[in-house]
């Protein structure tokens, strides 16, 4: 059931803007006005409020009315073909109406549509709605929509140059990283963290990587994508950080991936190659890693990085190893001691 709902919301995001149904009463005459009067603002308020109400109260079996109202809101909120004045006022009115509607949206379908509308508007004013949905909503599809919405709003956050917003988003992600299990939702959360140059984002990213690698199904292709993207995010965070404790935390995250990530087969593994390349870049050093070696030899080389960091006291402790790797190392050490 959860998979079906998630697929529905994925399709919904993909189809936004295609075949949008136009409501009978529109605000098309205001789109290109260079100045929006109070009366115009009231017209926009009335229109968007009616659309939000139609979206969250619609009971059509096929959700046609709900989707039409949602898509109409999203369509009016686009920047193309709208004057700056209309774009600003519409965004303010739409987010206010959606915030009021959130209190009345009870069904899963209504909540999914509402979060999708907020996400597609890509407004920083909608961040509180998305953060609350991510942290508290019981429906996986709604949390997915909130995670994607935070990623979609990242450009607007960066344009505002308001570090507090980056920290707030990172804080919300940090609250759910232990409990969120959907790989596609986690993908957008890690992507968002990687976009921000903020102390909190760096700390949450490094800690979250360790937690993900320890509990996720590493054979899941989406998890592999998360790890590959996070390696690059950790590299960027390292370059920007000046705090010694943050540097140690980032190296600990790298070490955890080195210790726990396992290749799906014996062929050279792209994740291992990019992981080693990042470590060489940030440390200026090398271990016995050869890009053309099979993944078993590459894994052993990555463990050299771990032992190096522990020996040089760059990380507080060695991450736990997969049981099979731990046993192989013990057997190898025992065999070495017995050899004259």
Image (spheres, grey):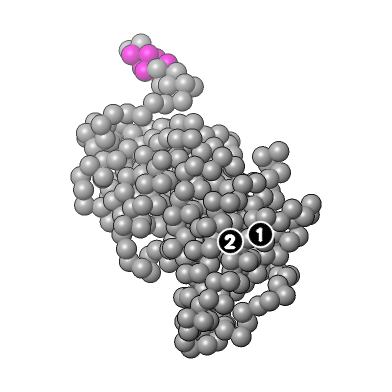
Q: Is residue 144 above or below residue 41?
A: above
Residue placed most toward the observer, 200 or 218: 200
Q: Is residue 110 visible?
A: yes
* Residue at image location 53% in from the left, 63% down from the top: 97
Return the residue at label 1.
Answer: 55
Magenta-highlighted stretch: main secondary structure? helix
Rate crowding at label 2 as few (under 14), some (14 to 19) or many (20 or more) other CA atoms within 10 Å. many
Q: Is residue 304 above or below residue 24?
A: above
- Quadrant position of residue 327: top left
Provide the residue span drawn in magenta: 331-337
Do the residues under discs 2 and 1 have CB atoms within 8 angstroms?
Answer: yes
Please tell me whether mark 1 sits on a helix, a strand or a loop.
Answer: helix
How far, Cα to Cα, is label 2 from label 1?
A: 10 Å
Rate crowding at label 1 as few (under 14), some (14 to 19) or many (20 or more) other CA atoms within 10 Å. many
Q: Is residue 95 above or below residue 134?
A: below
* Residue at image location 57% in from the left, 83% down from the top: 31
> Is 336 one of the magenta-colored residues?
yes
Quarter of the C terminus within the rendering: top left
Q: Is residue 302 visible?
A: no
Return the residue at label 2.
Answer: 117
């Amino acid at each position: 059931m959860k998979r079906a709902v998630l697929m529905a919301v994925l399709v919904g995001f993909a189809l936004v803007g295609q075949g949008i149904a136009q409501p009978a009463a529109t605000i098309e005459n205001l789109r290109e006005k260079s100045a929006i009067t109070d009366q115009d603002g009231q017209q926009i308020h009335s229109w968007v409020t009616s659309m939000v109400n139609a979206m969250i109260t619609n009971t059509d079996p096929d959700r046609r009315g709900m989707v039409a109202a949602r898509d109409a809101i999203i369509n009016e909120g686009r920047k193309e073909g709208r004057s700056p004045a209309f774009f600003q006022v519409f965004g303010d009115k739409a987010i206010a109406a959606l915030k009021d509607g959130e209190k009345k949206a009870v069904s899963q379908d209504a909540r999914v549509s509402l979060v999708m509308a907020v996400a597609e508007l890509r407004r920083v004013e909608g961040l509180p709605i998305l953060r609350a949905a991510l942290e508290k909503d019981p429906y996986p599809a709604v949390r997915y929509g909130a995670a994607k919405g935070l990623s979609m709003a990242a450009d607007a956050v960066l344009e505002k140059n308001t570090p507090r917003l980056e920290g707030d988003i990172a804080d919300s992600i940090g609250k759910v990283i232990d409990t969120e299990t959907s790989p596609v939702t986690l993908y957008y959360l890690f992507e968002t963290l990687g976009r921000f140059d903020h102390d909190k984002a760096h700390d949450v990213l490094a800690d979250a990587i360790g937690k993900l690698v320890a509990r996720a199904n590493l054979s899941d292709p989406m998890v592999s994508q998360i790890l590959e993207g996070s390696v690059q995010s950790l590299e960027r965070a390292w370059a920007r950080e000046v705090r010694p404790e943050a540097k140690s935390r980032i190296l600990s995250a790298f070490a955890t991936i080195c210790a726990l990530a396992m290749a799906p087969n014996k062929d050279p593994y792209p994740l291992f190659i990019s992981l080693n390349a990042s470590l060489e870049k940030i440390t200026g050093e090398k271990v016995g890693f050869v890009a053309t070696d099979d993944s078993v030899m590459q894994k052993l080389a990555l463990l050299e990085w771990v032992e190096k960091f522990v020996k040089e006291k760059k990380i507080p402790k060695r991450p736990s190893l997969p049981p099979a790797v731990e046993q192989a190392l013990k057997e190898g050490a025992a065999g070495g001691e017995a050899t004259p």
